[in-house]
Image: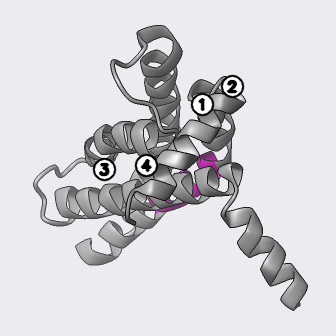
Amino acid sequence: MITRLRSLRSWSKSHQGKKLIRYTMVSASSTVISFLALSAFYGLKIIPSVILSTLAGNLVASVPAYQLNRRWTWGKRGKSQLRREVVPFWAMTFIGICVSLVGAVWARHEVRSHHWSHLANTALVSFTNLASFAIFWVLKLIVFNRIFHVETIEEIDEQLSAEESTPS
């Protein structure tokens, strides 16, 4: 058990380990933002539609997710490359939102079919969106890792040196 923990700790300090941990943290942050936004939009009846609340909550979360993933997870700086970074990110984001909207359609059906309280309906809508995020997460990791791939070992060494020299 101790050997496994040491191995995991060692891996977490590797370039790939750091990327996965950072990606997971950004995903968790954007999931929380989406969950809170959707819960507020629908729960407070700011946007009374299940579908539009889901769309709005996911869009709110996607803007900081792009910047955090690009800069912090993959260490990219400077101008974004439209074809290699922006378009693939937003394409994947919109596919993820479509997955969430499928869940929202199901949640809307449940809300309309049952006479639950608005609080129960809000919980159903919010947790359905959360489940949709979980389903789509792994696919996004694989694709984003290719989008923001650092090309050479020198760039990796440069990035790791910069990270080690800055305080956490």
Is residue 83 in view from this perspective? yes
Q: In front: mark 3 or mark 1?
A: 1
Mark 2 residue type: Thr
Residue at image position (66%, 63%) is 13
Residue on which disc 4 sits: 104
Whole-number angstrom distance, CA of label 1 to CA of label 2:
5 Å
Tell which circle, 4 or 2, labels the residue nearer the N-terminal end.
4
Q: Which residue is mark 2?
A: 152
The magenta region covers: 128-137
Residue 167 position within the rendered picture, expressed as x and y whole percent measured from the top left: 37, 64
Q: How many marks?
A: 4
Give the CA distance from mark 3 to mark 4.
6 Å
As rendered, which of 43 and 66 lies closer to the eye? Answer: 66
Which of discs 4 and 1 lies nearer the camera? The answer is 1
Q: Are marks 3 and 4 in contact (CB under 8 Å)?
A: yes
N-terminal of the two: label 3 or label 1?
3
Check disc 1 and give the amino acid type.
Answer: Glu
Residue tagged by mark 3?
Answer: 50
Residue 16 placement, left or right of 27: right
Asked if marks 2 and 3 touch (Cβ < 8 Å), the reply is no
Tag 2, which secondary structure?
loop
The answer to which image quadrant residue 112 occupies is: bottom left
Is the residue 1 above or below the residue 160 in the image? Answer: below
Colour basis: one colour
Going 59% across and 25% down the picture, which residue do you hit?
A: 147
Task: Check residue 155 in the rendering and tell me which mark sits there, or answer none.
Answer: 1
Magenta residues: mostly which secondary structure?
helix
- 139 relative position to 98: left or right: right
Q: Are marks 4 and 1 in contact (CB under 8 Å)?
A: no
- Three-letter code for the amino acid on which mark 4 is drawn: Ala
Q: CA distance from mark 2 to mark 3?
A: 45 Å
Nearer to me, 131 or 22: 22
